Amino acid sequence: AQTVTQSQPEMSVQEAETVTLSCTYDTSESDYYLFWYKQPPSRQMILVIRQEAYKQQNATENRFSVNFQKAAKSFSLKISDSQLGDAAMYFCAYKWQGAQKLVFGQGTRLTINP
Amino acid sequence: DAMVIQNPRYQVTQFGKPVTLSCSQTLNHNVMYWYQQKSSQAPKLLFHYYDKDFNNEADTPDNFQSRRPNTSFCFLDIRSPGLGDAAMYLCATSRAGTGTRYGYTFGSGTRLTVV
């Protein structure tokens, strides 16, 4: 069974600094997708960034980038120039290409200190 | 804007009294999902509809049912809510095929309280 593990229940960072959230996953599949979702308090979950497993190049979306290490089954999220609005619960998620199901990690609560 | 709308945002129900949560979408996505998210935990998939085909997760209790009368609407029915069913319920949609590589679009959720 596919599993996703986020080993950091909570992280904090100073505003304008850089923070990295960790995620590892377990799968025997070769064709899959990985996602980071952001869930602000009492607000809907939104997609931050995604990565196709067949792509070697790490995905980047403005201040958000990933470090995808396929052999190590690692998918970390780097947030540069952290802003107060980045404070949220962040979920790492996995989806096998042949299935509809999105499997989530336990989440990391990110606090931004002004 | 195209979106996923969940009603109500907050629902209080009595122990054992049936309750229905609703979800609608304007994205014309053919897959709709219901997730249960308890406090500080990962969302857990209950079931999903791929078009009209219902797909139940193996560990979803029988107490939870779903209906999808058309592409736009999907309902979550809890037949006899227990205290352990208090949670945030998230509806999400996706487009099967190439669209699923883009992940899901989520609604804002319904927070269910059982008293």
Image (cartoon, coloured by chain):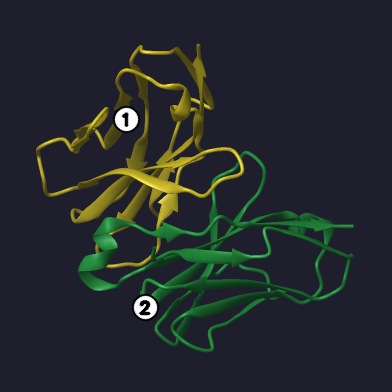
In front of the other: A71 or A114:
A114
Name the amino acid, label 1: Leu
Tint applied to chain A in the drawing: yellow
In front of the other: A9 or B5:
B5
Badge 1 density bin: few <14, some 14–19, many ≥20, Cα 10 Å:
many
Q: Indicate left or right for A60 with B90 as reference.
A: left
Residue B85 sits in quarter: bottom right
Quarter of the image that includes the N terminus of chain A: bottom left
Q: Mark 1 and mark 2, same subunit?
A: no
Q: Indicate left or right for B5 with B88 as reference.
A: left
For the point 18% across and 53% down, the residue is A30
Q: Secondary structure at mark 1?
A: strand
Foreground mark, 1 or 2, reads 2
Residue furthest to the front in view is B1
- Name the spot of residue A44 as percent of width and height, x first: 52, 49
Q: Secondary structure at mark 2?
A: loop
Tint applied to chain B in the drawing: green
Q: Is residue A105 visible?
A: yes
Q: Indicate left or right for A79 with A11 as reference.
A: left
Report the disc number at residue A77.
1
Subunit bearing disc 1: A
Report the disc number at residue B30.
2
Name the amino acid, label 2: Asn
In front of the other: A1 or A94:
A94
